[in-house]
Image (cartoon, rainbow, N blue to C red):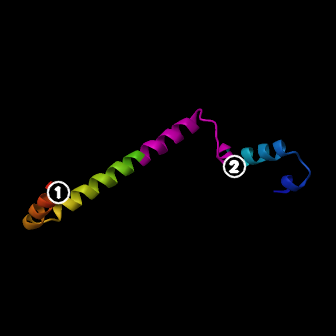
């Protein structure tokens, strides 16, 4: 951390941080190599988790209604 206070330029400080903590410290990493794989894996994971959450929720709601509740719901939705 002394590099930030040693009178170095901004570019030198950024280079030091990138070397120490990788490109994700910039919050705009280059999407090449393993960064590309990591970025797309996170996107796919988020989509899968969202799809799974919606699917589980819809299954749980339909399974918890008895016959009378289901028929009442159907009447309400038709109106």
Image quadrant holding the N terminus, namely: bottom right
Whether 27 is among the magenta residues is yes
Element marked by disc 2: helix
Q: In which quarter of the image is the C terminus?
A: bottom left
Camera-near label (2 vs 1) is 1
| Residue 78: image location, x then y, percent | 14, 54
In primary-sequence order, the first of circles 2 and 1 is: 2
Q: Which of 64 and 11 is in front in this view?
A: 64
Q: Give residue 61's position: percent from left, percent from top.
A: 22, 61
Residues marked 2 and 1 touching at CB (< 8 Å): no
Query: In this figure, which residue is indicated by the disc labeled 2?
Result: 21
Which residue is label 1 attached to?
A: 77
SS of the residue under disc 1: helix
Asked if the magenta segment contains residue 53, the reply would be: no
User: In which image quadrant can residue 74 be found?
Assistant: bottom left
Above or below, 68 against 20 in this view is: below
Residue 66 placement (x, y as % from top left): 10, 66
Q: Is residue 4 left or right of residue 58?
A: right
Distance from disc 2 to disc 1, alpha carbons, whole Å, reads: 55 Å
Few, some or many C-alpha atoms within 10 Å of disc 1 (few <14, some 14-19, many ≥20)?
A: few
Identify which residue, 44 or 1, lies in the foreground: 44
Magenta part, dominant SS: helix
Going 17% across and 61% down the picture, which residue do you hit? 63
Q: What stretch is highlighted in magenta?
A: 23-46
Q: Residue at x 73, y 48 (%)?
A: 20
Q: In this view, does 34 lie to the left or right of 20?
A: left
Q: Residue furthest right?
A: 7
**Which residue lies at the image location 55% right of the left edge and 36% below the top edge?**
36
């Amino acid at each position: 951390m002394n590099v930030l206070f040693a009178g170095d330029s901004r570019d030198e400080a950024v280079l030091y941080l990138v070397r120490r903590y990788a490109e994700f410290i910039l919050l705009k990493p280059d999407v090449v190599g393993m960064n590309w794989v990591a970025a797309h894996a996170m996107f796919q994971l988020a989509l899968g988790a969202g799809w799974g959450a919606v699917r589980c929720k819809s299954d749980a709601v339909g399974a918890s209604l008895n016959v009378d509740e289901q028929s009442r719901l159907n009447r309400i939705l038709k109106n």
